[in-house]
Structures are given as C-alpha cells and as structure tokens.
Image (tube, helix red, strand yellow):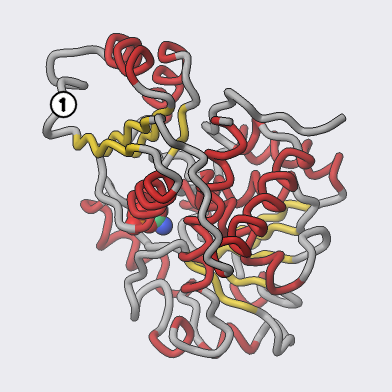
Amino acid sequence: MAVNLTGRSLLTLLEYTPEEISYLLDLSFQVKRESRAKIVHRRFVGKTLAMIFEKRSTRTRLAFETAFAEEGGHPIFLSIQDIQLGAKESIEDTARVLGRMVDAIMFRGFKQETVETLAKYSNVPVYNGLTDVFHPTQVLADLMTVQEVFGRLKGIKLVFMGDGRNNMANSLMIGCAKMGMHYVVCSPKELRPDEKLFKTCLEVAKETGGTIQIEEDPEKAVQGADVIYTDVWASMGEEDKQAERERLLRPYQVNEHLMKKTGKDETIFLHCLPAVKGQEVTFEVIEGKQSKVWDEAENRKHTIKALMIATLL
Ligand code: CP
Ligand code: NVA
C-alpha cells in the first residue's frame, strides 16, 4: 500500500513503520537534490507553523524556520518567555487555541508529556523538536547521513558512546531497531537505557532483523562499527550533573585511539551537535576525515522539510 502521512504528528519514531521512515528518507533525498539544483517550490503558501521553544536551539530552529519559509509558509517563533503557556494557561488550552490558528506545531522542551498533550488537543500535526526523552527529527537526519555514506541502513552497526539513557541514545535505539540496524549502546551501568524502552526496541528489532546490545567496554563495543555516535555528557536541563558525568563518562570519550579500534577505515563519526570538544569527542576526531557532522547538520533541514511536506500536503 502506498504510504500516506498526511495529518500525522511525529512524537517518537516508534509510531512510524520502517516503510514510512524509508518513505521520509527517500523524500529527504529528493528535497536535497532539488535544493542543490536550486529548484524552488512554494508548497507551504498560506500555511503557518507555530514553533514553541522551552530550551535553546540552533539547528532545529533554523531547519524548521528556513524549510517552512522557503516554501512560502510563515513560521512563528514562540519562546516560552513570551507566551502564556506554562505561566497562566494550561498546555491543553494553548493547544486548542493554536490548533484553531496554525497548520502545524513544533515543540522543543522538557517533558515528553507536553508534546503529547499538544498533539492530543490541537488537531494539527505536532513535531517533537526534542524533549528530555526523545529527539526523533534528529534521528531522521542521522539515518539519512548513514544511508548517504553507505547506500543502505540494514545491517549497519551504529555504536552510541556516552549517556546511554539520554534523548539521543533513546531515539537512535528506536531508529536503528526500526531500520534493521545493529545498535550498541556503550555506557557505564549508571547510564543505561530505560528497561521498558530497551525491551520495546528489542521486539521491534526482532521483526526487522536488527539487534540491540548494551556493552560497558568501549573497545569491545566499537569492534566492526560502521558508525560511532556520541552526544554531550550533560544534556540541556542537566547542567547540575556535569561534574558527575565527567567522572562517569571520561572513559567513553571518542578519540583517535577508539576510532582505530573499529578495525575499519571507513567508519564514520556522527554527533547531533552542539559538541563539547575535548569532552565527549576530541578535536582531532570531530575535525577529522571520518567526521560527517556537517553533512548531518545540513540533513536536518532536508529531513524536516520532507517531514512537513509528507504530513501537511
Ligand atoms: N542537534 C540539535 O538539535 O541542535 P540544536 O539544539 O542546535 O537545535
Ligand atoms: N542530548 C542533547 C541533545 C542536543 C541536541 C540535549 O538534550 O541537550
């Protein structure tokens, strides 16, 4: 059956089938080719997108805002400091009002529950632009970058080094399971993925031919890896945990020694960014030949544009 995503929200990739994710990636490649060829479309003329930010953002804001505006739409940046949400007005009421005025909502913030409530009460597509638990639009760009380099996703081994229970580790685990990839989360015991989500992803992987594994030893984890991925040691909202994370995660730094331990010259390095060079990754690795982080950042825009085309038209 042909894929039709019109009207759909993206809260986590768990709600999307492998076919739907592949469809979004194919559309992302088309959007990227059109962008390179300077082909202009006006697919969002007359439409508006509300973008609510409780946390900071560079890439996600730019990707949504430029992708929507380029197609003739009107993106509206709503900082939590400026709107009634959370101050006087409930999430439910804000959602109902937004749903009467805009065509779609992007939310970046703390609780996953907030983005779910926005979707439940607004009646328009809602996109999760990062919560404490998930960052699904980032994973679309990550999958696109992996496919761009290796020509496939199935069977690719991706190792996530570091805080194994943060929004990136969680979302990558879902994305890899959905696409039949081999996902290894390499972190100390204290920072392992949530048991329930891990089990859910194991079930998904069983169906797609993927695997999910937890490994504490960095050198063992990266053997044969096609992709090494890392993220900051303390995510937004966890600044008070910085010292403890430095202590726990120092052995999990991605450096040239670890990159060599994959035993493959073609292994690539990915990072959602922003990166703290000298902590989770060394300057040499992120600036080195194996790093694809700038392509990955660019792909945020193509995948986000594709997601909005697929769900709004
Ligand atoms: N990767 C990412 O989401 O970056 P921003 O926090 O800059 O949006
Ligand atoms: N884990 C990071 C991702 C930033 C894109 C954070 O939440 O701060």
Q: Residues within 10 Å of mark 1 (few under 14, many from 20)?
A: few
Residue at (46% x, 65% y) in the render: 297
Residue at (34% x, 54% y) in the render: 62
Q: Quadrant of the C terminus?
A: top right
Question: For this rendering, which residue is in front, 295 or 210?
Answer: 295
Question: For this rendering, which residue is in front, 89 or 25?
Answer: 25
Image height of 2 relative to 136, above or below? above
Question: For this rendering, which residue is in front, 203 or 191?
Answer: 203
Image height of 29 relative to 6, above or below? below
**Where residue 286 sits in the image (x, y, percent)?**
45, 81
Q: Can you see residue 109?
A: no
Image height of 233 relative to 84, above or below? below
Q: Which residue has dot 1 on it?
A: 83
Residue at (66% x, 85% y) in the render: 261
Residue at (69% x, 57% y) in the render: 183
Q: SS of the residue at dot 1?
A: loop
Question: For this rendering, which residue is in front, 27 or 113?
Answer: 27
**Where residue 167 sits in the image (x, y, percent)?**
46, 46
Q: Is residue 302 left or right of residue 155?
A: left
Q: Quadrant of residue 19?
A: top right
Q: Is residue 45 left or right of residue 290?
A: left
- Kind of residue at disc 1: Ile
